[in-house]
Amino acid sequence: MDPRLGDDCHVSPAATVGHRHRDGASPPVVGDRATIRSGSIVYADVEIGDDFTTGHDVLVREDTRIGDDVVVGTDTVIDGTTTIGSHVSLQTGVYVPTDTTIGSEVFVGPRAVLTNDPYPIRKDVELEGPTLEDHVSVGANATLLPGVTVGEGSFVAAGAVVTEDVPPETLAMGAPAEHRSLPEALDGGNDIA
């Protein structure tokens, strides 16, 4: 399947852009100035904006919508049916499950794990990934449980386990994460652009 690539795109010959997951799937659409490195796989039925960059061995599954100026780090998995805004940085080894929403100006640190199944295998429930609103930062090795919303401008500390919604402009730290006032040094949101 031939992808629809914008201008000045660089796709490694060892990458797959347009993996067909079903009959009748639409070719992926990738905006201008993309860099897709070796080992990366982008499924059909994916739409990506301008200035997209991957590390190596990235997976972007079907029914994913990604805005402009998004970096997806090495070994990161976006498991599909997900929306990601613009000016987003997903660092090395991030896991993004289906049915997740990530806003704009969001940073997700190395090996952070987002989840969408509250009772893996034990109960048949509807999957619901987390929602990260605009200007959220998530530290390395943090875990976000299914269905939680991390409010605009919030900061999730490294190693935190987020079990409930985080209000806007809040620091979440610990396991399970406790909410604290956002320190002045962390106030003001992200500027990833």
Image: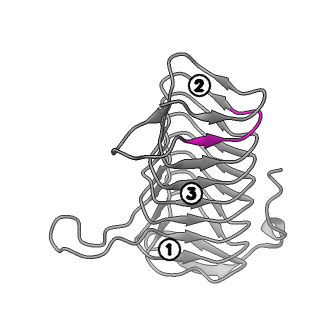
| Mark closest to the chain's N terminus, 2 or 3 | 2
- Which corner quadrant of the image does residue 167 belong to? bottom right
Residue placed most toward the observer, 187 or 32: 32
Mark 2 secondary-structure assignment: loop
The picture places residue 158, in percent across and down from the top left corner, at 56, 57
Q: Is 107 rendered above or below residue 76?
A: below
Q: Residue at x 59, y 25 (%)?
A: 37
| Secondary structure mainly formed by the magenta segment | loop
Residue 6, x across and y down, in percent: 73, 35
Sequence-first tag of 1 and 3: 3
What amino acid type should be assigned to the residue bearing mark 3?
A: Ala
**Residue receiving disc 1:** 177
> What distance separates the C-alpha of mark 1 from that of mark 3?
11 Å
Q: Position of residue 127 (x, y in %)?
A: 34, 70
Residue carrying label 2: 37
Count of numbered marks: 3
The residue range painted magenta reads 28-34
Disc assigned to residue 59: none
Q: Quadrant of residue 31?
A: top right
